[in-house]
Amino acid sequence: MRRILVALLFTVSAFAQSPRIEKIDPPNWWATMPAPMLLVKGENLTAAHFTLSDASLHINKLVISANGHYAQLWLSASPAHSQTIQINVRTPNGRTSSRYSFASRRSSSDSFAGFSSKDVMYLIMIDRFADGDPTNDGPDHAAELAKPRGWHGGDLRGITQHLDYLQQLGINTVWITPVYQNRGSQSYHGYGATDMYAVDDHFGTLADLKDLAAALHARHMKLVLDTVPNHIGPNHPWVRDSPDPTWFHGTLEHHTIAQGDFAPLTDPHAPWRDQHNVTEGWFANTLPDLNQEDPAVARYLTQNSIWWIEQGGLDGLRIDTFPYVARPFWQGFHAQLHALYPHLTTVGEVFNSDPTITSTFAGEVTRTGVDTGLDTPFDFPSYFALRDVFLKNAPMTRLADVLRLDNLYPHPERLIPFIGNHDTARFLNDPATTPRTLELAFTILTTMRGMPQIYSGDEIAMHGGEDPDNRRDFPGGFVPAPGAVQNDAFNPSSRTPEQQQSFATLQTLLALRRSHPALQTGDEQLLHADQNVLVYVRTLHTPTQPSQRILVAINKAAQPSDTIVNIEATALEGAQQANTLYGSSEATLTTNTLTLHLAPQTAAIFDLN
């Protein structure tokens, strides 16, 4: 009996010490893709020997963490054809194996279209838009709904179910916040990943993401996914047990706080003392900052974006906290993405009002370091200018001063202007604003150079202060509380008069933009700016048709304005007639003069020939 017991204990002990594989990142890869680095998570991997069942594939480099919980497998290549291989692990205490699949890549014509100034982007915060599948709301849904920063139930199916609404408004590109698994009581926003390769249960499944992409593409619409290479969430397993100590800047106990002043990064005279907390600090003193200077971290993050692009057939990426990551990583990141997906487009968040700073992060700009490869940053400078003009009574010259600096960008036509997003108070939150003010801002947003971005809810005049009040549930996307009256803004018959007026205004402006290519890709020439009036023209030259000239005039004053513009040696020279496209103001032309009779707080758009 004693021998049996000893043998049994020995067997149990050996089994306890034998290697185990719990997870592999990426969960799969693709044939003919660049060679992957596989991050194996498991137990008892110390001194492990790894082999692959396909003799044509080799492990060029193997790195095992000191505690035996992680192994980096740097493969020599991806197979030439789709297949499933066996990853074998052997240690002195036992052996195990795991299957790993290399799938066939999507056809290049399947998606990956990118976006441009011909498009209109609509930002959706997944959790706050529409609850399309109540089964994923969680057992504590009622309690979460009552929390301003709780999980409210919006999901991927909810977006798919309301694509008619978006198309009716005039949207063709949808930007959704991150879908990563976010295990946290206040992580509804998606920016605190606890697993960068899983769709959070609250949002649905990977199949739901693929269904959304397919539904958008069937309508000739596009999908842009938010990605966060800068940091992970505080509840991510790596925070307490990282694949390598070098994967983070600092530790949970000892780290610096991220600095939001980007000026030192663009200043050739700034010491490292003034720069390092931008790229190495923990965002909000909460989100662990990844060390992209580590080659394994850089490879992991680049592969992660590729994985989501290929899985979802994405058309573009919105990149969060872009300046907080050092430029060399972005150069390699974009080189890889653009080599695989030549038409895919990236837009970076550079939350700063100064064009001399924002422009330095655009691709092809090397005056402050290596080329980031970024297709475009968001146009935060014009956002701040538009807010100043309409909410703080700054002169129209404030916007003109921003536009004057467009020559700092290699491609100003790629910029994405906006009047609000999920990180800012709603445009209508200021008590001095009115639906008319919003109309004037919408007019400039939809007719200025670049690609306009609309924050979900702005089209129905939604109110809301700072975070989290600016992230209210979209009316009609959720089951109303017992006894509450349903305000379904998805349905025209259920909108309030204010909601319908705002929706109809933006719908009309976007239809006008869609039917006049000059408003999408035409050159922009500023003709006049003073305290209250802004006048500019968008001109499109074509080899087969006469030039299209669309004139935009805004008067934000409470009084009418008669504005006289000298058009000699301008894009309007030779124009003889102004046909009204929008508004009720008047425009008259003489040989060298344009006279505009603008009513108070009025937007006017004319087609000149």
Image (cartoon, rainbow, N blue to C red):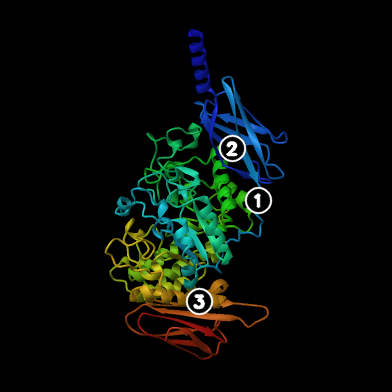
Residue most extreme to the front: 1
Label at residue 38 = 2
Q: In the image, what residue type sits under mark 3?
A: Ala
Relative to 482, is 278 on the left or the right? right
- Residue 297: give x, y in percent of width and height: 53, 39
Label at residue 198 = none
Marks 3,2: beta carbons within 8 A: no
Looking at the picture, does residue 332 appear above or below residue 403?
Answer: above
Looking at the picture, does residue 321 appear above or below residue 1?
Answer: below
Q: According to the image, label 1 marks what residue? A: 105
| Mark 3 Cα-neighbour bin, 10 Å: few <14, some 14–19, many ≥20 | some
Q: Quick one: label 3 or label 2, which is nearer the N terminus? A: 2
Query: Cα distance, mark 3 to mark 1?
Result: 36 Å
Kind of element beneath mark 2: strand
Residue 441 appears in view: yes
- Residue 505: give x, y in percent of width and height: 42, 76
Residue at 32% x, 54% y: name it.
145
| Mark 1 Cα-neighbour bin, 10 Å: few <14, some 14–19, many ≥20 | some
